[in-house]
Amino acid sequence: MYGKTVRLKRLFPEPGHRLFSVPLDHPVSMGPIDGLEELRPLAEELQDGGVDLLIVTKGAVRELVPVLAPTTLLGVHVSASTTLGSTSNRKVLVGSAEEAVSLGADVLSIQVNFGIPEEPDMLRDLGIAADQCRALGLPLLCMAYVKKANGGTPDELRHAARAAADTGADIVKTSYPGSREEFAKLCRTTPVPVLIGGGVRLEDEAEFLRIVSDSVAAGAGGICIGRNLFQRRPVAPLARSIANVLHGSA
């Protein structure tokens, strides 16, 4: 278990340093969307902006490695589905913790979509991934979403986050429940660090930064935000503003 402890300390080195993570796994599910046409230049710009952790699919590691800084942590996402199929919310495992370690991963990432008929299958996959990660000392991040109207109620989001943690996740990413008070309650009832996800892109950059600041004040372990960051041009200035909030400089 020492390996997991060491790796978690790299992810969360001190109380005032929240994790700045950016998921870049979207091309499998959504194709080469705006902002993710090319991975390398985006990764370089994000790192210049102060990002701690980049999360990619296992095949994309080959593009990332040439520009990955020694201080940047690597996450490998092993859940997949595509919008080309009729069951895009049903995620399946396409990799293992052992494979992620061989690629140099600091954390394994998996997605569970709650509130749909295929939920039990994804919970089973989460359990499998948790067992693999425990054996190898690799932290496990679960992206826990509620696939209901408006992204789930605060009660449903708390349920999903707690279920993910109690099934073996070491870190949980979930949607922001609409207010600092509700998010603080979610953090209190989830026994592992909680990261907020960005969801659909917000046009108002100031509103986006307010949510990041409010999440920190509410007890978030950090953020795991993609489109609300990499779909803005240029990326680095906003990334630096976020890093200042998350790393205790603002």
Image (spheres, helix red, strand yellow):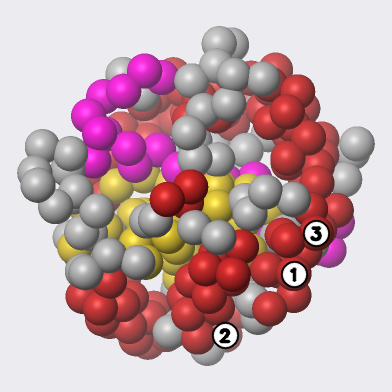
Question: Residue 198 versus residue 193: which sits nearer the camera?
Answer: 198
In-image side of 222 versus 61 (left or right)? right
Which residue is drawn at the image coordinates 68% and 31% (left, top)?
208
Residue at mark 2 to residue at mark 1: CA–CA distance: 30 Å
Work out which residue is located at the far top of the displayed protein and give it.
233
**Secondary structure beneath disc 3?**
helix
Question: Residue 33 versus residue 39: which sits nearer the camera?
Answer: 33
In-image side of 245 versus 94 (left or right)? right
Which residue is drawn at the image coordinates 48% and 47% (left, top)?
150
Disc marking residue 185: 1
Which residue is drawn at the image coordinates 68% and 78% (left, top)?
189
Disc marking residue 181: 3
Q: Which residues are magenta?
A: 8-35
Tell me whether the residue at label 2 lies in contact with that at label 3, contact meaning CB atoms closer than 8 angstroms: no
Work out which residue is located at the far right of the displayed protein and give it.
250
Give the mark nearest the N terminus, 2 or 1: 2
Mark 1: give few (<14), some (14-19) or many (20+) Cα within 10 Å: some
Disc marking residue 2: 2
